[in-house]
Image (cartoon, rainbow, N blue to C red):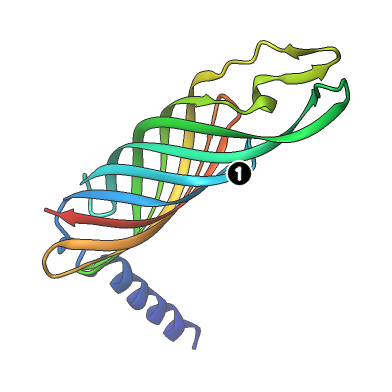
Amino acid sequence: MKEFLLILILLVGGNLFAQDNDALPKNSMQVFFGPSQHGTDFVWGSALTVAYSHAIHKKLQVIGFLGSTMHHGKVDVDFWTSSGQIDTAKVDFTTGGMQGGLALGFSFYRSSRHHLQGSLGTLFRYQTTSNPEVLGLFTTYPYPNFLNFPARSSSFGGLAYISYDYTLKSGFLIGAKAWLQYDSNDDALNIFSLVIGKRF
Protein backbone atom coordinates (compact mmCIF):
# COMPACT_ATOMS: atom_id res chain seq x y z
CA MET A 1 0.00 0.00 0.00
CA LYS A 2 2.81 2.42 0.88
CA GLU A 3 4.50 1.70 -2.45
CA PHE A 4 1.26 2.40 -4.32
CA LEU A 5 0.75 5.73 -2.53
CA LEU A 6 4.35 6.76 -3.21
CA ILE A 7 3.99 5.98 -6.93
CA LEU A 8 0.67 7.85 -7.06
CA ILE A 9 2.19 10.93 -5.38
CA LEU A 10 5.17 10.93 -7.76
CA LEU A 11 2.94 10.58 -10.82
CA VAL A 12 0.46 13.27 -9.77
CA GLY A 13 3.17 15.62 -8.52
CA GLY A 14 5.31 15.15 -11.60
CA ASN A 15 2.36 15.79 -13.85
CA LEU A 16 1.30 18.83 -11.85
CA PHE A 17 4.65 20.58 -12.02
CA ALA A 18 5.77 19.42 -15.44
CA GLN A 19 2.71 19.62 -17.66
CA ASP A 20 2.56 22.28 -20.35
CA ASN A 21 5.53 24.20 -18.93
CA ASP A 22 6.49 25.38 -22.41
CA ALA A 23 2.94 26.29 -23.43
CA LEU A 24 3.00 29.82 -22.01
CA PRO A 25 5.00 32.45 -23.92
CA LYS A 26 8.20 33.56 -22.21
CA ASN A 27 7.35 37.26 -21.98
CA SER A 28 4.50 39.25 -20.51
CA MET A 29 3.52 42.82 -19.73
CA GLN A 30 1.22 43.30 -16.76
CA VAL A 31 -0.58 46.08 -14.92
CA PHE A 32 -1.56 45.69 -11.24
CA PHE A 33 -4.05 47.98 -9.54
CA GLY A 34 -5.77 47.72 -6.18
CA PRO A 35 -6.02 48.76 -2.53
CA SER A 36 -2.93 49.22 -0.39
CA GLN A 37 -2.33 49.63 3.34
CA HIS A 38 0.53 51.80 4.56
CA GLY A 39 1.72 50.16 7.77
CA THR A 40 3.56 53.25 9.06
CA ASP A 41 0.61 55.64 8.76
CA PHE A 42 -1.96 52.85 9.34
CA VAL A 43 -4.06 54.15 6.47
CA TRP A 44 -5.45 52.75 3.24
CA GLY A 45 -4.90 53.95 -0.29
CA SER A 46 -4.16 52.54 -3.72
CA ALA A 47 -1.23 51.21 -5.71
CA LEU A 48 -0.56 51.01 -9.44
CA THR A 49 2.31 48.96 -10.89
CA VAL A 50 3.50 48.10 -14.40
CA ALA A 51 5.73 45.03 -14.76
CA TYR A 52 7.62 43.11 -17.45
CA SER A 53 8.34 39.41 -16.95
CA HIS A 54 10.75 37.15 -18.84
CA ALA A 55 11.07 33.40 -18.28
CA ILE A 56 14.69 32.27 -17.95
CA HIS A 57 13.71 28.69 -17.07
CA LYS A 58 10.58 26.57 -17.04
CA LYS A 59 9.99 27.61 -13.44
CA LEU A 60 11.98 30.86 -13.07
CA GLN A 61 11.10 34.37 -14.25
CA VAL A 62 12.88 37.71 -13.95
CA ILE A 63 10.47 40.57 -13.29
CA GLY A 64 11.12 44.30 -13.56
CA PHE A 65 8.51 46.72 -12.23
CA LEU A 66 7.75 50.42 -11.77
CA GLY A 67 4.84 51.74 -9.73
CA SER A 68 3.31 54.33 -7.47
CA THR A 69 1.30 54.40 -4.25
CA MET A 70 -1.00 57.01 -2.73
CA HIS A 71 -2.41 56.94 0.81
CA HIS A 72 -4.65 59.39 2.61
CA GLY A 73 -5.55 59.71 6.28
CA LYS A 74 -6.34 61.95 9.24
CA VAL A 75 -4.43 62.58 12.48
CA ASP A 76 -5.27 64.51 15.66
CA VAL A 77 -3.30 67.74 16.23
CA ASP A 78 -3.60 70.06 19.27
CA PHE A 79 -3.64 73.82 18.71
CA TRP A 80 -4.37 77.14 20.39
CA THR A 81 -7.71 78.73 19.57
CA SER A 82 -8.17 82.49 19.13
CA SER A 83 -9.62 82.62 22.64
CA GLY A 84 -6.44 81.10 24.08
CA GLN A 85 -7.90 77.64 24.67
CA ILE A 86 -6.33 74.34 23.68
CA ASP A 87 -8.37 72.39 21.12
CA THR A 88 -7.88 69.26 19.01
CA ALA A 89 -8.72 68.82 15.34
CA LYS A 90 -8.19 66.17 12.72
CA VAL A 91 -5.72 67.15 10.02
CA ASP A 92 -5.75 65.52 6.60
CA PHE A 93 -2.48 64.20 5.22
CA THR A 94 -1.26 62.40 2.13
CA THR A 95 1.65 60.01 1.67
CA GLY A 96 2.71 59.26 -1.90
CA GLY A 97 5.57 57.27 -3.36
CA MET A 98 7.24 56.07 -6.55
CA GLN A 99 9.13 52.78 -6.61
CA GLY A 100 10.81 50.34 -8.93
CA GLY A 101 12.84 47.18 -8.70
CA LEU A 102 13.56 43.60 -9.73
CA ALA A 103 12.15 40.28 -8.55
CA LEU A 104 12.76 36.59 -9.19
CA GLY A 105 9.62 34.54 -9.64
CA PHE A 106 9.15 30.80 -9.11
CA SER A 107 6.27 28.94 -10.76
CA PHE A 108 4.50 26.60 -8.36
CA TYR A 109 2.14 25.63 -11.16
CA ARG A 110 2.35 26.58 -14.84
CA SER A 111 0.15 25.26 -17.65
CA SER A 112 -1.24 26.54 -20.93
CA ARG A 113 -3.85 28.59 -19.03
CA HIS A 114 -3.00 28.72 -15.32
CA HIS A 115 0.02 30.22 -13.57
CA LEU A 116 0.59 30.23 -9.81
CA GLN A 117 3.76 32.09 -8.84
CA GLY A 118 5.68 33.26 -5.79
CA SER A 119 8.32 35.99 -6.02
CA LEU A 120 11.04 37.67 -3.96
CA GLY A 121 12.74 40.90 -4.91
CA THR A 122 14.29 44.22 -4.06
CA LEU A 123 13.10 47.77 -4.64
CA PHE A 124 14.06 51.43 -4.49
CA ARG A 125 11.39 53.80 -3.17
CA TYR A 126 11.01 57.59 -3.12
CA GLN A 127 8.32 58.87 -0.77
CA THR A 128 6.88 62.17 0.39
CA THR A 129 4.41 62.72 3.23
CA SER A 130 2.53 65.51 4.99
CA ASN A 131 1.69 63.38 8.05
CA PRO A 132 2.30 65.60 11.14
CA GLU A 133 3.21 62.56 13.25
CA VAL A 134 5.82 61.36 10.78
CA LEU A 135 7.17 64.90 10.44
CA GLY A 136 7.54 65.02 14.23
CA LEU A 137 5.07 67.79 14.96
CA PHE A 138 4.37 67.97 18.70
CA THR A 139 2.52 70.82 20.36
CA THR A 140 4.69 72.40 23.04
CA TYR A 141 2.85 75.44 24.25
CA PRO A 142 2.79 78.17 23.31
CA TYR A 143 4.68 77.19 20.13
CA PRO A 144 4.68 73.98 18.10
CA ASN A 145 7.98 72.13 17.89
CA PHE A 146 9.10 70.56 14.61
CA LEU A 147 11.59 67.74 14.93
CA ASN A 148 13.94 67.13 12.05
CA PHE A 149 12.22 64.17 10.34
CA PRO A 150 12.26 64.31 6.53
CA ALA A 151 9.07 64.93 4.60
CA ARG A 152 10.83 63.31 1.63
CA SER A 153 12.79 60.08 1.84
CA SER A 154 14.58 57.58 -0.38
CA SER A 155 15.02 53.97 0.67
CA PHE A 156 15.86 50.43 -0.40
CA GLY A 157 13.71 47.49 0.55
CA GLY A 158 12.56 43.97 -0.08
CA LEU A 159 9.30 42.44 -1.22
CA ALA A 160 7.47 39.14 -1.45
CA TYR A 161 4.29 38.33 -3.32
CA ILE A 162 2.14 35.49 -4.55
CA SER A 163 0.06 35.73 -7.71
CA TYR A 164 -2.30 33.75 -9.87
CA ASP A 165 -3.29 34.51 -13.45
CA TYR A 166 -5.37 32.89 -16.16
CA THR A 167 -4.34 33.29 -19.81
CA LEU A 168 -7.03 33.56 -22.47
CA LYS A 169 -6.65 32.09 -25.95
CA SER A 170 -5.88 35.58 -27.26
CA GLY A 171 -2.82 35.77 -24.97
CA PHE A 172 -4.37 38.32 -22.62
CA LEU A 173 -4.31 37.41 -18.94
CA ILE A 174 -6.30 38.27 -15.82
CA GLY A 175 -5.43 37.48 -12.24
CA ALA A 176 -4.81 38.61 -8.67
CA LYS A 177 -1.76 39.42 -6.56
CA ALA A 178 -0.99 39.82 -2.84
CA TRP A 179 2.17 41.85 -2.13
CA LEU A 180 4.13 42.69 1.04
CA GLN A 181 7.12 45.06 1.19
CA TYR A 182 9.38 46.66 3.79
CA ASP A 183 12.09 49.28 3.30
CA SER A 184 14.96 50.98 5.11
CA ASN A 185 12.71 53.94 5.99
CA ASP A 186 10.76 51.52 8.24
CA ASP A 187 7.75 51.69 5.93
CA ALA A 188 5.73 48.51 5.43
CA LEU A 189 3.12 48.28 2.68
CA ASN A 190 0.51 45.61 1.93
CA ILE A 191 -0.84 45.64 -1.61
CA PHE A 192 -3.74 43.62 -3.04
CA SER A 193 -4.15 43.92 -6.79
CA LEU A 194 -6.14 42.81 -9.77
CA VAL A 195 -3.87 41.94 -12.68
CA ILE A 196 -4.37 42.38 -16.41
CA GLY A 197 -1.75 41.85 -19.08
CA LYS A 198 -0.58 40.24 -22.30
CA ARG A 199 1.74 37.33 -22.96
CA PHE A 200 3.96 37.33 -26.05
Task: Identify whether 153 is placed above or below 193.
Answer: above
Pointer 1: residues within 10 angstroms few (<14), some, or many (20+)?
A: some
Task: Identify whether 129 is placed above or below 113.
Answer: above
Determine if residue 164 is in view: no
Q: Position of residue 40 (x, y in %)?
A: 63, 35
Closer to the camera, 134 or 172? 134
Q: Where is residue 121 in the image (x, y as percent from the top left)?
A: 41, 37
| Residue matched to label 1 | 43
Closer to the camera, 159 or 83? 83
47 horizontally vs 57: left or right: right
134 horizontally vs 98: left or right: right
Residue 5: quarter of image: bottom left
Task: Identify whether 94 is placed above or below 42.
Answer: above
- Residue type at tag 1: Val
Q: Where is residue 14 in the image (x, y as percent from the top left)?
A: 31, 70
Closer to the camera, 123 or 56? 123
Q: Which residue is drawn at 45% across and 46% down?
A: 46
